[in-house]
Amino acid sequence: MPRWGMVIDVKRCIACWGCTIACKEEHFLPPRVFFNRVLIGETGKFPSSSKLIYPVLCNHCTDAACVEACPTGATYIREDGIVVVDDDKCVGCRACLVSCPYQQRTYYDKEVKDREYFPGQGKTELELIGEKLYPLKVGTVIKCNFCAERIDDGLKKGLTPGKDEDATPACVNACPVGARVFGDLNDADSDISRLIMEKKGKQLRPEFGTEPAVYYID
Amino acid sequence: MTYKTDEIWEDKWVNTTCGVCYCGCACRVRVVNGVPVKVEGIDESTMGGTRGGLCGKGIAGLMYYFDPNRIKKPLRRTNPEKGFGVDPKWKEIEWDEALEEISTRMKKIMEDNPNKILFTNQTMRASDGPHNHLYFYAKAFGIPNNGNFIIGGGSLHCGNAAHMLGGLIHGAWSIAPDWRYTKYVLKWGSSKGTGSGHSAMINARLRADGVRRGIKEIVFDPMGNFAGGKATQWVPLLPGTDTAVGLAIANYILNTRGEIDELYLRAKTNFVYLIREDGTFIRDEKTDKPLVFDEKAKKIKVFDDDSIAYEDFSLEGDYEYNGEKCRPCFMALKEHLKQFTPEWASNISTVPVATLLEVAKGWVDNAQIGSTITIEGQTFPFRPVSSVTFRGAQGHSNGIHQVAAIDLISQLVGAEDVPGGTMGWPSIRRKYPGGQYERLPKVGKDGVIVPSVFYSHDPWPVHPPTYPCTNSGCVEFWSHSTLSHIPYVKEKDYIQDKFGVEKVKPEMIFGIAVNFLISNSDWDVALENFKDCFVVLSDIWVNETDQAIGDIILPDTSYLEKDTWSSEIDSFFFNGSPSYEDWYVHLQKPVAKPVGESRDFMNVYLDVANRVGVLDKYHELLNDYYSITDEKLQLKPGEVLNWKEIGERILTWVYGDDKEKIQEQGFATWHKPIEDVYWRWNMPTRCPVYMEFLIHDRRAAEKIMKDTGFELEMDMDQYGPLPNWFWPTSHKELDDEYDLLAFSYRDILHTNNSKPLYVYYYIK
């Protein structure tokens, strides 16, 4: 069984927000809801300062704090390592929001659902069709799912996640500088395993002990 | 969560070209039930980022279609008072009424003088399509000198000085590092590779691969934004002082280290041309060609005499021709550069001497002068150093000298259009295999390259300043500008009166996707200059210019709704295949129905031309522009076709038998032969690094100023042949009481505007 993971090469990233927007389009997310964000800061002392650019998303942790916190079993880890929310079981208690050390979860309530891209001008055709194509359930918690639908559909078609566009997360396809690599962490020969090994991939805040499946190289 | 499929009757991907900025990356759009829902890149095309990746701005392009503020019907101003913030009290009118009023007014003005109509566009692809058509469309109306009244002025909005030097040195619109082979890149006020500039995502992809390979990137920039912030080293400097640092580095290369690519300088620059004491070229009496000294034959010859071997062109020596003392102009450069010490440059720019010397040393050490590389069986000089600039450094009153100094660094080590060096991009458009329409630069007067296509006002051959001027930009006088800023400045009337332009005071403007009032530094002056015109503008939204001075606003379709079959053909010179990348052709195809009653402006162009009675002339110009010699495909007198129908003819001409295949797929790529990439040593051109023409042009300009009593202050010393240091106007106007400088910048999310929406500060 594969264990899906991602490597983000911060040396390549130029903060174009392609991943952020591609993700919003893929999941038809309302205004101010992001499964992919780009955190930008500075390091060093002038004039030897430089930008720190970290694209962040759900880490799909092996020891996920959100799974432990969920009282109903709605949040669970699939066999392939992807952390998902079963919206039939989610009761919207938001314990997971508080427990996620990476702040990657959003509570989807009526206020969020009713937000308009052009406030006060009604929902666009895009928003309306999005509600049909990718229905989100009010009163539940939503988050990045590594584009599990693409992976599942792609695998059914015999495609390889991380290689074939139609089986690969939208943010990976969108990245114009190849900063995102997706693949199987259980396969020692996969591109991502090799990159993590060669470039000494690091997880964010390893001290939390959550064992993220998203690694960063620089 | 799963997709609901029972309500889907259509779910398809359409290949097209992004239209959010002028880069035009390959993209595909997912359309569900007639609604575009997703934008992605095209992995199989090289016209874009890695795996066909796009930037956030391009992916968000869907909003151009869904924006409820799109104009849906033609609008007519009912409030005669014009101005920013004044409600025009728009009234929706029918297309026929709008077009009838426009054409009737045009016909009336044309009876008087067609030059009173100005056509304009902007590099705004949101609405825009074929950029170049404006020029010959204007010609169809009998307007030979629409001038360079475009792009909202030639100020910081567009790369005026950068384009001039790009044209003179590379026969190209712009420059970029040869990311694939370079090792050491100097970027000056430019974000090439970090999200901006031409072919932005291609450059971003190539840079990312290069950075992973270990390229060192040194960024001179007042702001540690994405270019500086992601660089190996960011070197902050005072805005507009890049020249000083560039000249000091050039001095280090030539006079301190003395390590230069002599063979390149002898073979590929005009530094070997002989000058007399006043700095002008000595020319052959018969042919008027500049002269050089053949060291082997010990004889003065014309510069393109085949009997001289490259290594025998003299760079130094004192000679005599017809009793007149002369010497290669390289000697003038050598002496000229000595004054630019690192300490001097440091005082001006704030760059520490040690940093400057470290960068200069890195440059020479990495240039590998004398080395070669073999690619695809051909051997080229290998110079893995590149010095590039764009909007930031050149957007000052000393812009030409800024760009020339930055270019000089590459010249001295022979790093121009060779592997690893500074690449003009792209200089040529190869025809699609089996098709037609090829654009190749030529060798012009004095051995200088003549670009195959330039937006406006070819950089070569340059003409000396003349008057009277016939267009609002007064480009006859400011003969080196790529784009003119004159129509927008408060001195416009004075300048135009002095230079004899008043008799063609514009009465009507027809603009496509422009926002020229706020693309300039002084909005109120620009407003005053144009508010008395009858202004017709076509756009997808009502912008500030439309609101302030528009009389009729025509709803255009966005790039998602129009069939811009000519997008790549027309604008190859700023989004064609750069560097060592496959050739490509791309179409922009409609993915959705037009919003409201919006119409593609090209169809409006055709309709208006027909109503005014100049359609046949326009057809003639189109045949000429695309060089169509096949009679069956030529557009004929009396024919009335829409833009798509015209495209059917022209695409058959341009793509040959593969037309339908390319239309279906939306693009095609094919291998670029290596000699198309690194053409420098295959083409007998010489870079006019010694800009001798400026000496003559200074004399001509000064005479005109005297004859006309022109009294505006101009820094005439800028008309000098060698890159030199001049404080930009922005510094001259500083008030010593304040020690904070504010300047504007743009980042990747910003497109097509030059106002200081973002302001950054530099403490002196």
Image: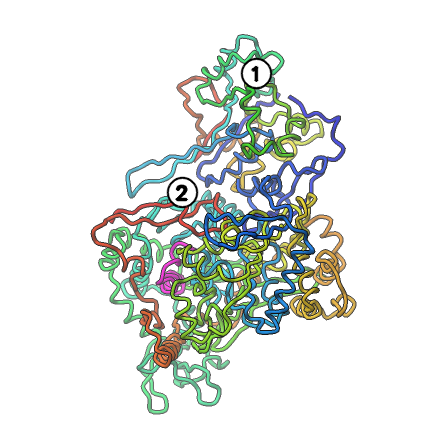
Q: Give the range drawn in magenta.
A: B391-413
> In this orientation, which residue lies closer to the viewer: A201 or A47?
A47
Asked if residue B485 is positioned above or below residue A205 in the image, the reply reads: below
Q: Where is residue B733 in the image (x, y as percent from the top left)?
A: 28, 58
Disc 2 marks a residue whose amino acid type is Lys
Query: Quadrant where the C terminus of chain A lies?
Result: top left
Q: Element at badge 2?
A: loop
Dot label at residue B516: none
Q: Element at badge 1?
A: loop
> In this orientation, which residue lies closer to the viewer: A214 or B654?
B654
Residue B180 seen in the current view: no
Q: How crowded is mark 1: few (under 14 residues within 10 Å), some or many (20 or more)?
A: some
Residue lying farthest to the right in this orientation: B632
Residue lying farthest to the bottom in this orientation: B323
**Quadrant assignment, res B343:** bottom left
Nearer the observer: mark 1 or 2; the answer is 1
Q: Dot 2 corresponds to which residue?
A: B230
**Quadrant assignment, res B134:** bottom right
> In this orientation, which residue lies closer to the viewer: B757 or B115?
B115
Residue located 52% across and 19% down the image? A107
Q: Where is residue B208 in the image (x, y as percent from the top left)?
A: 48, 44
Disc 1 marks a residue whose amino acid type is Gly
Magenta: main secondary structure equals helix
Q: Distance between the residues labelled 1 and 2?
A: 41 Å
Evaluate whether label 1 is on the same chain as label 2: no
Q: Dot 1 corresponds to which residue?
A: A139
Residue B363 seen in the current view: yes
Residue located 60% across and 17% down the image? A79
**Quadrant assignment, res B103:** bottom right
Task: Write down the chain letter for disc 1.
Answer: A
Q: Is residue B13 left or right of residue B364?
A: right
Q: In this view, does B741 lie to the left or right of A90?
A: left
